[in-house]
Amino acid sequence: EQLQIAFKNFGGNMLFKSILIANRGEIAVRVIRACKEMGIKTIAVFSDADKDSLHVKYADDAVHIGPALSRKSYLNIDNIIGAAKKTNADAIHPGYGFLSENFNFAKACFDNHIIFIGPSAQSIAKAGDKSAARQTLMDLGIPIIPGSDDILSSSDMACKVADTVGYPVILKAAGGGGGRGMRIASNKEELITAFSIASGEAKIAFGNPDIYLEKYIEKPRHIEIQILGDHFGNYIHLAERECSIQLRYQKLIEESPSSFVDENFRVKLGKTAIRIAKAFDYTNAGTMEFLVDKNKNFYFMEVNARVQVEHPVTELVTGVDIVQQQILIAAGEKLDLKQEDIHLNGWSMECRINATDPNDNFMPSPGQIESILFPGGPGIRIDTHIHDKYMVTPFYDSLIGKLIVWAKDRPAAINRMSRALSEFEIKGIETTIGFYKKVFKNDNFQKGDIDTHFLERI
Ligand code: MV4
């Protein structure tokens, strides 16, 4: 359907003349940069809090879409569609977060004959329905974490499933997400207690007492595969990103490739990721997330139906501009890349620069930036919208920029990131920069001996 609109709107000349960027901050700037290099006119949208922001300054046109509160601006579908119609935008790039994986928004774009730069609304819905997705993929023989295929009706049933998958097990709330409402049990006794606590908590927290059970994967790594798929059934993968360095399900440091993934394993993960994409009729850029145990067993977790915060590390090792590929695919172009064109060169790492205080439980630290000194020199990329005197408001995510490095191998990338962090100075607010300096000195981090619990431990 997306393609039909594209043909109707642009005939033979497919490339968009203008794109509205339905986002703010560094990712809005990133998308504008891709458009400029492609000769596409850019239209920014902005809330009251962002009228002087960099994405507004860089775009060719800008439309005010409401007050600072996201719900009334960047999450307001009517206002954003209205801005696109007013400015005659051919397409909308949603960035990440906000409306990027919102079925109703993708559908509203479609209904208004505006191309949504992302997968179809139907694919978003298919990939987003966790329980249906699990069934679909299980039927295809794609590895998913062993567990109850449905919600548990009693602790008796929980114990039966636990006996078949083996302890330890984890209880998850069906209405939860992002790690909330999870409980681990190492034996039958613990499971019986955990079952009643978990369903009670789930009811209070999510208004839904339903819980399901999975085998608990101890000290897993979070490894994800970037894929691209066009409207003609062509798919490629752009290898993996290692995203295990996280705290409370917030990624902080990402890298590509992963020191845990050799060429054989990469081929296996890549092929699996493409099979998952095909199962969801997935088009455009997307990410398949896997949990990987110490024996390299891997299990599909979920699809991220958007461009991700950490996409630059993949860009730096593959040389592929993921945002430009998103735009070309959405405009109905055939993928001009084949799997055999994709070669990994060197190593890339990213530190998310957050306006949070590592010495105060990573609490948000809004305020005015007095001054900034950015690192530079060989192998440094900074994606940000901040500048001297920029006001970090409390209204949005605390991500204020990303420091990304490229070097020939992992030790060189670590060395370069440490050097870059030592040059980076932000005065006036607290940030995660100083914390990263310590992480990069850690022996286990340097050895690549990491998992999703690494930061909790240190
Ligand atoms: C798990 C797991 C171990 N075993 N499931 C956390 C968020 C949620 N989306 C899935 N999560 C996990 N599920 C089983 N069966 C460990 C985690 C987990 C995790 C997963 C991905 C990234 C970071 C994580 C940090 C802690 C726990």
Image (cartoon, grey):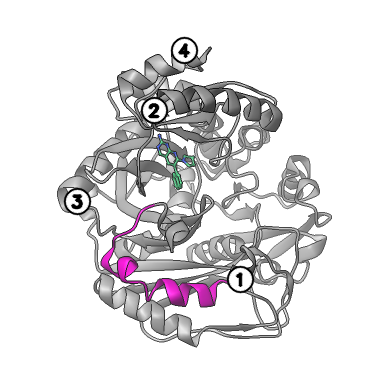
Q: In the visual, does 155 lie left or right of 216? A: right
Q: Earlier in the sequence, mark 2 or mark 4?
A: 4
Badge 3 marks a residue whose secondary structure is: helix
Q: Can residue 197 be seen from the camera position used here?
A: yes
Disc 1 secondary structure class:
helix
Question: Mark 2 = which residue?
Answer: 187
| N-term-proximal mark, 4 vs 1 | 4
Q: Amino acid at mark 4?
A: Asp
Q: Nearer the viewer, residue 166 or 292?
A: 166
Going by the numbered disc 2, the residue's amino acid type is: Asn
Q: Which residue is mark 3?
A: 340
Residue placed under numbered mark 1 in the picture: 359
Q: Tell us which disc is closer to us: 2 or 4.
A: 2
Magenta span of residues: 432-451
- Which disc number belongs to residue 156? 4
- What's the amino acid at mark 3? Glu
Q: What whole-number distance in Å separates the C-alpha atoms at marks 1 and 2?
A: 37 Å
